[in-house]
Amino acid sequence: QGCNPLAETGRSKLQNQRAVLNQQILRAVRMRAGAENLLRATTNNKVREQVLLELSFVNSDLQILKEELEGLNISVEVYQNAEETFSIPLVPLGLKETKEVDFTLPLKDFILEHYSEDSSEYEDEIADLMDLRQACRTPSRDEAGIEMLISYFLQLGYVENRFFPPTRHMGVLFTWYDSFTGVPVCQQNLLLEKASILFNVGALYTQIGTRCNRQTQAGLENAVDAFQKAAGVLNYLKETFTHTPSYDMSPAMLNVLVKMMLAQARECVFEQIGLSGIRNEFFTLVKMTQEVAKVGEVYMLVNTAMNQEPVKENIPYSWSKLAQIKSDHYKALAHYFTATILCDHELQPGDDEEQQEKALSQLCDHMPEGLMALAVLKDKVRRKQLGKAHLRQAIVYHEEALRVCGLCKKLRNIDVLQEVLTAAHKRSLLKYAQQETEDDFLSLIQAPDILPKTEHKIETIAPQFSKVKVKDFFHKLGPLTVFSAKQRWTAPRTICIPQGAGELRFHLKGGSPVQIYCLDPLCPAALMGLKEGDYIVSVGGLDCKWLGVNEVLEKLRSVGEQPLEIEVISCQDTAASLRSKSATYSVGMQKTYSLICLAMDEDKIDQTKKAPLKLPFLSWGTKNRQKAASTLCLPSAVAGSSQTKKKLLPFTLLNTESSMY
């Protein structure tokens, strides 16, 4: 079950505010769309003036609503750990909001039409599916919440194979709101539901990461793990759904979000290294300098990515500025540590000159003109001069971070951020004031840049769907390899074998359900309508869809000399695959059209002909990402079919060759 949606927690209040804002944005977008249509349709100048005035008001309202939504996205204090901490806040992702979906009528109609079963017997299963979806709207912020979201995601794989045929839509409309713009996206495609659930899995991992106690070793380890898993889920989403109609799930946006999560994991690793204190020792400070320079570098790359089109228009402005602030802050710390190395550590007779020279030369991208690493280490005056140069550079970066923070309204209201930046700035100023003043012009040398280096590898952790065990809600329909939406069946036929018929004169084969083969066309069962290739679904009124050959034979023998009734179904020959054109409409966004390939089953190709490798119309998986345009091919029907069934995966998302929307 999900969290209580009425619970007055800080996070639930934010999500409720997000839902209200989404509705307000939807109304404003509809008003703008209506006004724009009227503006295009009318030729009356007076009407045009009124419409233009109304459009200006609507656009102003939309801008205000967008700023309010940005304010929710930067409300990072709510998601932080409750313990008092003196660390720069981490940024979580908000959960995508959705509307309720009623599966009852579409699924019941499909069960009756496609599977020829009494749909009233599946009301509990449909209710369980809807309850699980409802609970996924308010998941708990822990591993139980993650497991529930993944369970629903995997359940959607079963539902897709059971009830969503590739040739038509089921009439179930899924609506999800963009996490950054609040614009709703409506589709009858189940892939939108899957992608949005995956996004929320990644978002929930980020909230778990920000909630960890960063004052303990275990808390920082959990935070690093959570952000790496968040990056892995978002990266999987980017590679699997490459043409999503929502801005927050576009490849460019997901690429930025993955970088941001890995940067936050890197930041937690640095905090983990320095948690027990930084020993004022030459080589320890060298390692810390390189580690903190790496943090500054990754945040600089995140800031650069956030300021690229088309992400720049939709990413929260405060996120971009926070990445810039963190980049400057950690670069300043790198220069501060370098200055400490030079000012506080003189080369002693027992020190390893060669190792210290190597470490110092690898620390900077170059040495100032006229200076050598060993000469600097041996000369006290030059050490001080270069150390002061690094302190000046650290102060410059600190002041830039404070300036950017002061210019952003949302960030300057975060007290702990201001406190951390101010304390670091004062520490550098104090260190600089402690150095002796010199009139030598060499004191104005420019400090070289610090080369980032790390001994700790940070990478995405791919989602482990196999660790979450789920049971198909609609297990009673039969094995998914046979009873799926892609295959059509005749209604069950009752075959009555009279008493004393003797041998049955047919054989059984296959797994579950069993199949008729080697049927004697003159036997009583054949005369009653039994056909070669039929599947037995019940014997004597007992369901046997999940029974094997031996179990069905045992039931047939148990009937004895009594009349025997079996129910069978026959596979209908499906027509050649047709291509369907599905329109994706998103309010306030450009219409997007996608072709969905309904590839012909390989089993329907004549065995005498070599089956060519078939690709879907639009294959947007990792293997075909470089192809800018789709390849259209029209398969034709081929007579004859093999009864060997190709095993279906319980969820098709893991197939990178599947058609995306």
Image (cartoon, grey):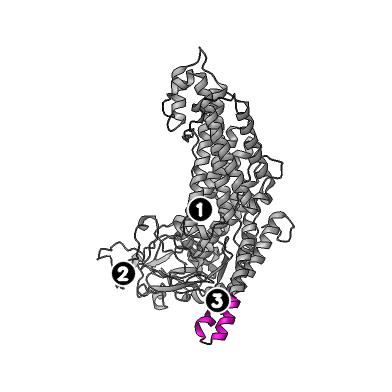
Q: Residue 537 location in percent, x, y?
A: 49, 68
Q: Amino acid at mark 2?
A: Cys
Mark 1 or mark 2: which is in front?
1
Depth check, front residue: 193 or 216: 216
Residue found 47% across the figure and 33% down from its top: 448
Q: Residue 432 location in percent, x, y?
A: 60, 30
Q: Which stretch did the figure color magenta?
A: 33-55
Q: CA distance from mark 3 to mark 2?
A: 37 Å
Q: Amino acid at mark 3?
A: Ala
Picture quadrant where residue 521 is located: bottom left
Residue found 73% across the figure and 55% down from its top: 9
Q: Amino acid at mark 1?
A: Met
Label 1 element class? helix
Depth check, front residue: 287 or 348: 348
Mark 3 or mark 2: which is in front?
3
User: Badge 1: how crowded within 10 Å, few (<14), some, or many (20+)?
Assistant: many
Q: Residue 494 location in percent, x, y?
A: 48, 76
Residue identified by numbered label 3? 33
Question: In the picture provided, is 110 more to the left or to the right than 373?
Answer: right
Residue identified by numbered label 2? 633
Label 2 element class? loop
User: Badge 3: how crowded within 10 Å, few (<14), some, or many (20+)?
Assistant: some
Verify CB contact (< 8 Å) between mark 3 and mark 1.
no
Q: CA distance from mark 3 to mark 1?
A: 29 Å
The verdict on residue 597 being magenta is no
Quarter of the image for the C terminus: give it.
bottom left
* Numbered badge on residue 306: 1
